Image: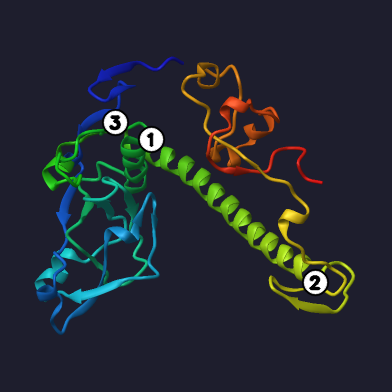
């Protein structure tokens, strides 16, 4: 079944999707300004800063505290499904609040978006803002143009956003959340494997494979049968350099050459082992292929 599309200011979308301002679906509120004067008081409460808010993720291990009056607590206390949007830094960065910390509040460099009239699903909206700000760049240049980019409440309020029918929003949010959880699980596996590799490298390079006694050396403990030598005893070195601009064949891609940034890239394997004498100007130290004895 073909879907009828409508052309809008931010692209083509299904014809039954509403394209409306952010403030048509959300109440927007900025938090309290952080200052030495505002910190003093008996009602010290934890609050979020921009450093705690990442794309669809909150980092809550290092929360600051500040005095909030009873009126400020009533106005600024976070509720489940509130969205937190960064006003500065990486503007638009958004995360969903799930009441991870009871009675938490937020500073003025964060906007709190709270769904009104059941027009939006909070998790869908978090993904939409991630997509619009960071992936598709639909909001590029929409922030206030100053020395430090920022997203004022008025600018955020007028941003156009796609609002599918609510059941469709929930389905989209469910699909993206499933993928997001799978990515997080994979990242945890990679992190665990990386730490395992580090531990294994440490064990092998200090204890070896034979369980022999260790000796202390200038680079730390190693097996007694191992020899510690200077790198120059086992490798030869050659000075690399940046090709001269007078040799355009190097710069037009007809002759491959290595720069330091290539050392982390797989395409280093495709670079030939030699470089012309004309290109041997002062530069980085390289250990060319075939130079290890």
The label number, if any, that marks residue 207 in the structure image: 2
Tell me the residue at 20%/32% (across/down): 20
Q: Residue at x 41, y 42 (%)?
A: 173
Q: Residues within 10 Å of mark 2 (few under 14, many from 20)?
A: some
The picture quadrant where one finds residue 109 is bottom left
Q: What residue lies at 20% left-to-right and 63% top-to-bottom? A: 107
Q: Nearer the viewer, mark 2 or mark 3?
A: 2
Picture quarter containing residue 213? bottom right
Residue 289: give its label.
none
Q: Which mark is residue 138?
A: 3
Classify mark 3: helix, strand or loop: loop
Tell me if residue 7 comes above or below residue 114 in the rendering. Answer: above
Say which residue appears at 88% left-offset and 76% top-offset. 212
Q: Is residue 6 left or right of residue 179?
A: left
Q: Which label sits in the foreground, 1 or 2?
A: 2
Q: Which residue is mark 1?
A: 135
36 is higher (above) or lower (below) than 22: below
């Amino acid at each position: 079944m073909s879907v009828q599309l409508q052309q809008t200011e931010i692209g083509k979308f299904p014809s039954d999707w509403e394209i409306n301002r952010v403030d048509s679906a959300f109440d927007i509120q900025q938090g309290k300004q952080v200052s030495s004067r505002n910190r003093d008081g008996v009602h010290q409460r934890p609050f979020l800063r921009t450093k705690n808010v990442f794309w669809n993720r909150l980092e809550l291990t290092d929360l600051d505290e500040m005095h909030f009056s009873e009126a400020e607590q009533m106005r600024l206390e976070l509720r489940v499904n509130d969205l937190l949007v960064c006003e500065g830094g990486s503007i638009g960065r958004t995360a969903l609040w799930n009441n991870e910390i009871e009675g938490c509040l937020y500073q003025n460099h964060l906007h709190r978006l709270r769904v009104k009239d059941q027009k939006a699903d909070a998790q869908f909206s978090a993904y939409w803002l991630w997509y619009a700000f960071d992936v598709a760049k639909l909001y590029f240049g929409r922030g206030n143009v100053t020395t430090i980019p920022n997203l004022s409440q008025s600018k955020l309020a007028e941003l156009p956003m796609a609002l599918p029918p609510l059941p469709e929003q929930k389905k989209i949010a469910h699909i993206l959340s499933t993928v997001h959880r799978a990515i997080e699980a994979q990242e945890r596996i990679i992190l665990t494997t990386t730490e395992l590799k580090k531990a294994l490298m440490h064990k092998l390079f200090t204890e070896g494979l034979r369980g022999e006694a260790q000796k202390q050396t200038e680079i730390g403990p190693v097996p007694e049968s191992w020899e510690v030598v200077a790198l120059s005893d086992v490798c030869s070195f050659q000075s690399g350099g940046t090709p001269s601009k007078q040799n355009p064949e190097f710069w037009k891609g007809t002759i491959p050459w290595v720069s330091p940034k290539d050392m982390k890239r797989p395409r280093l394997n495709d670079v030939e082992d030699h470089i012309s004498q004309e290109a041997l100007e002062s530069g980085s130290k390289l250990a060319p292929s075939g130079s290890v004895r």
